[in-house]
Image (cartoon, helix red, strand yellow):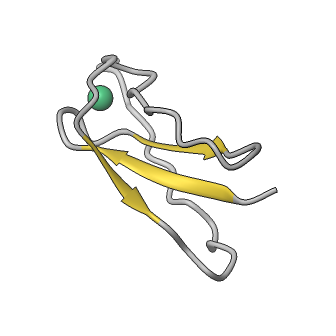
Amino acid sequence: MPIFEYVCKECGTRFEKLHKGSTTDECNCPACGSAAVNKAMSTFAAGSASETKCHSGG
Ligand SMILES: [Zn+2]
Protein backbone atom coordinates (compact mmCIF):
# COMPACT_ATOMS: atom_id res chain seq x y z
CA MET A 1 0.00 0.00 0.00
CA PRO A 2 1.27 3.44 -0.87
CA ILE A 3 2.17 5.76 1.96
CA PHE A 4 1.72 9.43 1.34
CA GLU A 5 3.51 12.10 3.25
CA TYR A 6 1.78 15.24 4.36
CA VAL A 7 3.07 18.48 5.81
CA CYS A 8 0.79 20.66 7.85
CA LYS A 9 0.76 24.24 6.69
CA GLU A 10 -0.43 25.46 10.04
CA CYS A 11 2.10 24.04 12.44
CA GLY A 12 4.48 22.35 10.02
CA THR A 13 4.00 18.89 11.43
CA ARG A 14 5.00 16.13 9.06
CA PHE A 15 3.00 12.95 9.13
CA GLU A 16 2.45 9.95 6.95
CA LYS A 17 -0.82 8.40 6.02
CA LEU A 18 -1.43 4.98 4.63
CA HIS A 19 -3.78 4.96 1.69
CA LYS A 20 -5.89 1.89 1.45
CA GLY A 21 -8.18 1.42 -1.49
CA SER A 22 -8.76 3.96 -4.20
CA THR A 23 -10.75 6.39 -2.14
CA THR A 24 -9.20 9.70 -1.30
CA ASP A 25 -9.86 10.53 2.28
CA GLU A 26 -9.20 13.95 3.66
CA CYS A 27 -6.15 14.22 5.81
CA ASN A 28 -6.05 16.34 8.90
CA CYS A 29 -3.03 17.24 10.90
CA PRO A 30 -2.77 14.93 13.92
CA ALA A 31 -1.16 17.72 15.89
CA CYS A 32 -3.48 20.68 15.40
CA GLY A 33 -6.24 19.04 13.39
CA SER A 34 -5.99 21.50 10.53
CA ALA A 35 -7.07 20.38 7.10
CA ALA A 36 -4.56 22.65 5.42
CA VAL A 37 -1.89 20.14 4.57
CA ASN A 38 0.49 19.72 1.68
CA LYS A 39 0.81 16.34 0.09
CA ALA A 40 4.41 15.41 -0.41
CA MET A 41 4.81 12.16 -2.27
CA SER A 42 8.26 10.71 -2.13
CA THR A 43 9.28 8.02 -4.57
CA PHE A 44 12.27 6.97 -2.57
CA ALA A 45 12.60 6.16 1.08
CA ALA A 46 13.33 9.15 3.20
CA GLY A 47 16.60 9.32 5.06
CA SER A 48 17.06 9.72 8.75
CA ALA A 49 15.04 12.40 10.38
CA SER A 50 16.82 15.04 12.35
CA GLU A 51 15.99 14.96 15.97
CA THR A 52 16.02 18.04 18.07
CA LYS A 53 16.68 17.97 21.74
CA CYS A 54 15.36 20.45 24.17
CA HIS A 55 17.72 21.36 26.93
CA SER A 56 16.03 22.68 29.97
CA GLY A 57 17.80 25.18 32.17
CA GLY A 58 19.74 23.60 34.88
ZN1 LIG B 1 -0.84 21.05 12.18
Vertical relation: 9 (above or below) 56: below
Position in image of residue 41 (x %, y %): 50, 68
Nearest to the observer: residue 56 or residue 45: 45
Position in image of residue 22 (x %, y %): 68, 49
Vertical relation: 47 (above or below) 38: below
Ligand 1 quadrant assignment: top left
- Give the residue drawn at x 43%, y 49%: 6
Vertical relation: 12 (above or below) 28: below
- Give the residue drawn at x 46%, y 22%: 30
- Give the residue drawn at x 58%, y 56%: 4
Residue lying at the far front of the rendered structure: 22
Q: How many numbered marks appear?
A: 0
Q: Is residue 20 left or right of residue 44?
A: right
Q: Is residue 54 left or right of residue 32?
A: right
Residue lying at the far left of the rendered structure: 10
Residue lying at the far bottom of the rendered structure: 44
Which quarter shows the C terminus? top left
Q: In this view, does 23 lie to the left or right of 28?
A: right
Nearest to the observer: residue 18 or residue 50: 18
Quarter of the image where one finds residue 48? bottom right
Position in image of residue 42 (x %, y %): 55, 74
